[in-house]
Image: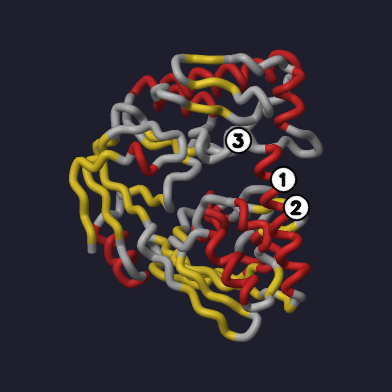
Amino acid sequence: MLVEENFDVTRLTSFKCGGKIKKVIFPESVEEFVQVLKDYPDAKVFGNLTNTLVSSDGYSGTIILTTKMTNFRFNGNKVEAECGLKGAKLSQAAEEKGLSGLEFMIAFPGTIGGEVFMNAGAHGQNIAGCFVEAKCYNPESGVITMKKDDMNFSYRTSVCQTKNLIVLSAVFELQPASAEDIKAKMDENLHFRKTHQPSLTLPNCGSVFRNPEGNSSGRLLEQAGVKGYTSGGARVWENHANFIINQGGSSSDILNVIQKMRNSVREKFNIELKPEVRFLGDNSKEVEICKDLKII
């Protein structure tokens, strides 16, 4: 099992921003993962840091990255995948089997664990739609199995966010479909991402804010006039107001832009936007900003 000390995670993060982490552990199986969680009860768990802002000052604790936990297996029209597997890879594997239900994942950079954690979805599909069960770890209960009804799935949320549950693996039930139909839906999703979201070559963390119920964060931010907001090397993307592009900016620069975006919508519409971005760091000033923004 790989363990890195004073590991610089900058190149791993979607924002291409960060610092050195005191200890990073890379388990390679569910069994190793569970043992690490027992040995390091205060460690923070991440997939591949695609929606995480890491402080430029680094982090003085221990984190666990699940990027080496990528096994999956099909059993009929069901598939079980470990939490570190990229959703896009599982989507492609399902396509090869002629199984539909995961086409929305093809355009996502995140991992299965993170996508279950936040009930990821797009274009009429989401995790809840094909989810069967997940093996999760809880410090009090150990390894437990969570069925769909246990997960309290709703828009971009699950029970994992409130009950300290860490996803180890998940099972999905898919539906047979023609290869042509599956590919067409995947191509449509990829085209939408290419035309509506910044390229992954532009460092960004995806949508900054969740959509309020019955509304669109992008529309609210656009009408609040946030395009053009900058701080250091961070700026609101000129083509869609719910994305931040970072080209050489620090974590503080990015947080400043997020604050400006949130405040502008609050002042104009009296609506409090909730960030999708997570934060890792122990810079006291940045931690206070994150508390104000309700970033976990």
Task: Name the N-terminal-most of marks 1 and 2.
Answer: 2
Find residue 169 and report its horizontal and vertical position in percent.
Answer: 48, 68
How many residues crowd mark 2 within 10 Å: few (<14), some (14–19), many (20+)?
few
Q: Nearer the viewer, mark 2 or mark 3?
A: 3
Circle 1 is placed at which residue position?
Answer: 192
Q: Are marks 1 and 2 in contact (CB under 8 Å)?
A: yes
For badge 3, the amino acid type reads: Pro
State the SS at label 1: helix
Q: Give the vertical position of 23 relative to 180 (above or below).
A: above
CA separation in Å, label 3 and label 1: 11 Å
Residue ID for mark 2: 123
136 and 257: which is toward the camera: 257
Q: Which residue is mark 3?
A: 198
* 228 up-or-down from 168: above or below: above
Instruction: Classify mark 2: helix, strand or loop.
Output: loop
Q: Residue at x 47, y 63 (%)?
A: 85
Mark 3 is surrounded, within 10 Å at the Cα level, by few (under 14), some (14 to 19) or many (20 or more) other residues, namely many
The colour scheme used here is secondary structure
Q: Which-is-in-front pick, marks 1 and 2?
A: 1
